[in-house]
Image (cartoon, grey):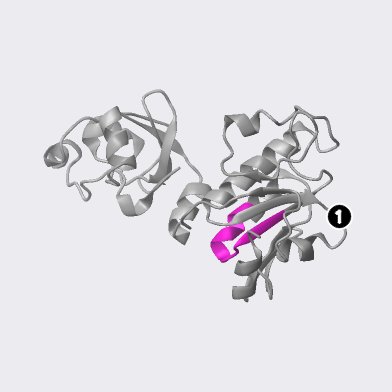
Amino acid sequence: MIWSNLFRRKSRTLLTAFGIAVGVAAVVALNALAGGFVEGYAALSGGSGADLLVMLSDVPGLLDAEGQVVARVEKVDASVRALVGSHKSAEGTGGMATKLEAAEIGRKGGFHVVLASGRESDVLARVADGEEIGTWFLAGEERPAARKQWLAFSQKSEGKIFIDDGAVRALVERKKSLLPSGILRAEGRFRAGAGVAVVTRRGREVARGVSNYSAADIEKIKGRKTSELAKIVGKAHFDEVVHRDNLTIV
């Protein structure tokens, strides 16, 4: 049973119903409406302390090409996304794709996500008892800090910062801040303090964060050493373009 032991230990739950988050006495996050907005809202609600998100639909779970329910998903990757549309249902391709994205946000947020049919009798109680009904998207190993989760999933990206391969390794492998020397270019017209997506030279997003410099200033300091910043942009208040405390890997 994935959930039963955790359920017995917990006394706090997040119930998300009709897009409203309220505290209740179980550890369940319920999404009772169709539509991408509510699903995204429910997934982001993990930052409020939920350990489980239940999305109720008109299908019994994620279906494979033969129409059978996929019991467990450890990561929403290309092979899982390929299942969308492989079996016809009233859910529709767009609706299921949105649910998969919400499930992956929740999974990365550190809590299990269950996609099940709302027509099943006592479905929430059965899930809370640990019954493996529907499709379970298993949580990642670590729950990110609330600010990191906000940066990853709630903060709107107003532009992009393209970085070289060395900077990618520094951010992802060594958990470093983003320095001007690793920046190739900026895209967008964002100001200092804006949320940005940090992407590889080919455009693959690797991180999100808050930029200490505007896009215009980044264009001036890209590829330069931190010791040169004051000469380029006047008084340099930051050595880092995006500090690691304001950066999260996605």
- Disc tally is 1
Side of 48 where 65 appears, left or right: right
Q: Position of residue 128 (x, y in %)?
A: 72, 65
Q: Residue at x 60, y 68 (%)?
A: 6
Quadrant location of residue 245? bottom left
Give x and y (percent) for residue 132: 72, 54
Q: Is residue 205 above or below residue 71?
A: above
For the N terminus, the image quarter is: bottom right
Quarter location, residue 98: top right
Q: Is 79 one of the magenta-colored residues? A: no
| 53 is within the stretch colored magenta | yes
Rendering quarter of residue 203? top left
* Residue at x-position 40% and y-position 23%: 202
Instruction: Name the amino acid, label 1.
Output: Glu
107 vs 133, left or right, is left
Residue 78 appears at what percent x and percent y?
58, 30
- Which residue does the numbered mark 1 point to in the structure image? 120
For disc 1, the neighbor class at 10 Å (few under 14, some 14 to 19, many from 20) is some
Q: Residue at x 66, y 28 (%)?
A: 82
Q: Residue furthest top?
A: 202
Viewer-proximal residue among 61 and 70: 70
Left or right of residue 189: residue 74: right
Q: Position of residue 8 (x, y in %)?
A: 64, 73
Residue 10 appears in view: no
Most foreground residue, 185 or 143: 143
Q: Which residues are magenta?
A: 43-54
